[in-house]
Image: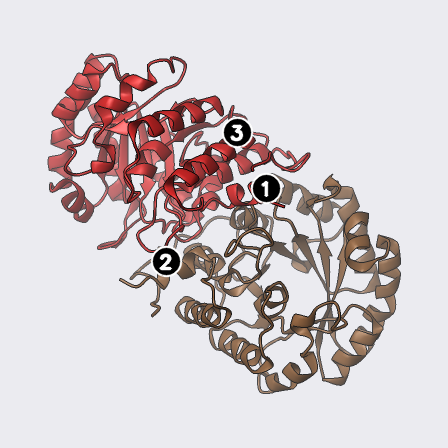
Chain colours: A red, B brown
Amino acid sequence: MTQGPPKGLPMTVRAKGLPSRVRIHEVGPRDGLQNESAVVPAEVKAEFIHRLADAGLSTVEATSFVHPKWVPQLADAEELYPRLADLTGVRLPVLVPNERGLDRALALGARDVAVFASATESFAKANLNRTVDESLAMFEPVVARARDAGARVRGYLSMCFGDPWEGPVPPAQVVRVCRALTDLGCDELSLGDTIGVATPGQVAGLLTALGAEGIGPERLAVHFHDTYGQALANTFAALQHGVSTVDASAGGLGGCPFAKSATGNLATEDLVWMLHGLGIETGADLGRLTATSVWMAERLGRPSPSRTVRALSHKE
Amino acid sequence: MTQGPPKGLPMTVRAKGLPSRVRIHEVGPRDGLQNESAVVPAEVKAEFIHRLADAGLSTVEATSFVHPKWVPQLADAEELYPRLADLTGVRLPVLVPNERGLDRALALGARDVAVFASATESFAKANLNRTVDESLAMFEPVVARARDAGARVRGYLSMCFGDPWEGPVPPAQVVRVCRALTDLGCDELSLGDTIGVATPGQVAGLLTALGAEGIGPERLAVHFHDTYGQALANTFAALQHGVSTVDASAGGLGGCPFAKSATGNLATEDLVWMLHGLGIETGADLGRLTATSVWMAERLGRPSPSRTVRALSHKE
């Protein structure tokens, strides 16, 4: 049993200097399910994505075309993607790690693709088995060919604020990789706090440094993790600096390695609560979103870690 | 097993216009334990408070002198308070609902007391069985006599942003009760979002409205609940408006009615992570705080809902 938010709440009070509309880039079906131990059947994934679209989300990252060996949870991309053909008004980005992945995505008609880079050498090595510059060289033909094919290209950048091996990440290092991804032709960059360690001053500092290099908030998204509970405060700081695309995961999907039901990604519902309270349009219906996350949590056999989902799905 | 934060993290980046130091008003032993179903023995409470003081917290709300019938969890105030006599450098506020409670607190040597009012008629009726004005009349002699005895007086104000019966709460209504509590002689007011529904614009709006009435941030504290995940974003907004006293509960103690391990109060550790990241001094040691919350969680037999506590107490 779920319900909408309490009558008249959150109260809407606009705050100065914030965007009037935010595009939520929903990552639950990809970034969320990729980190779940359970492998979810393609028909359940397809229903999940349809429900998210019905809840008013305009961008739902659908899957990844990495090699099935690396991410078995998303090995069914070829089976899943055609099931989404009726969602013509919804952007359905997919991850492509290399030209082979791009070929697979384009063959299915994908119009939104994303590459994933790292701001640190340690994570580039761990995640891509390459140096940062080697991974950028790998992405060069991917981005060029995707654009030639008329696709929009997002560049993910991991570890923009802290790295488990290297500690704090200097903004200049992030700016350099953002500049390189922009020069390759990425339409949008998503700044990832992969281990959730950022705080709002650091977010403001990086956005200011990027702006000084001509990379303004109109081409940036933020992607915060809630490992230390900082994701929404960091999002608010990013909104104050003009960012109007925010990544989030329905129900906070995306298991954390360290605790059952602890969160990885910022929960879409917690984000929507704040945005609607701030009078920012999202197109999302909080009641439907919550019902979708409860439905998905039942399929995964564990409760949603989203605070808003828990509050709104409380049985009296 | 707990550990301190990862080396060099959070990275410290000062943000413009924030206070250089924040006083954390720790409410775990009172507001936290009051809402736990388990009754914790006085010697465990005393050890908890000593550990919190050892972790660098300068203000630890110790207990409540309400009638034991209403809050059996804190019925041992007379047994607990003398066990804290060695904590001479720490402020140990106690709740006093009326003159009888004040008598009990002063007899034990309390130097910091707090009364608790409501911004809404519905909650005043539910919590105090009085109208707002009747409760203010009840507090008048309490505040006057506490001040005559040389005690500092905090006024708690519940339901400042939303009320479960009334929905959104107009700022003018909150301002009126704040003005009345100030006129009674309260040294500090704690603005409570008792059901956790506020968003940052609403926080900024209320602080602006209070400032226009001559009630500035230097005499205000904020008290946010994390029911919808908004507490830390709201705290950041309050800091941007000059507030430098923040209520929080170690480990996020304070059971929520709706879900095991869901949070009520903002977790002190999540707050400290943000403040230290922002370069704001607190005096708190995050490693010791986390160890204390893990210790307390073991005594309560359930994990801490604090994201930071979970992350830092993860067993590899």
Name the kind of residue labelled 2 in the image.
Ala
Q: Quick check: B249 above or below A211?
A: below
Name the kind of residue labelled 1 in the image.
Thr
Q: Are marks 2 and 1 on the same chain?
A: yes
Q: Name the residue under label 1.
A: B199
Name the kind of residue labelled 3 in the image.
Arg
Q: What element carries label 1?
A: loop
Q: Is residue A112 something that shows in the picture?
A: no
Numbered label attached to residue B281: none
Whole-angstrom CA distance, mark 3 to mark 1, is 21 Å
Q: How crowded is mark 3: few (under 14 residues within 10 Å), some or many (20 or more)?
A: some
Q: Disc 1 sits on a residue from what chain? A: B
Q: Mark 2 points at which residue?
A: B311
Q: Residue at (13%, 24%) from the top-left corner?
A: A99
- Viewer-closest of A207 and B16: A207
Q: Name the residue under label 3.
A: A288
Q: Where is residue B136 in the image (x, y as percent from the top left)?
A: 85, 59
Q: Quadrant of residue B285?
A: bottom left
Proximity of marks 3 and 1: CB atoms separated by less than 8 Å: no
Whole-angstrom CA distance, mark 3 to mark 2, is 30 Å
Q: Nearer the viewer, mark 3 or mark 1?
A: 3
Q: Mark 1 or mark 2, which is nearer the start of the sequence?
A: 1
Q: Quick check: B143 above or below A248?
A: below
Q: In this view, does A158 lie to the left or right of B64?
A: left
Q: In this view, does B183 lie to the left or right of A250?
A: right
Q: Quick check: A35 above or below B189?
A: above
Q: Where is residue B159 in the image (x, y as percent from the top left)?
A: 71, 50
Q: Do labels 3 and 1 share a chain?
A: no
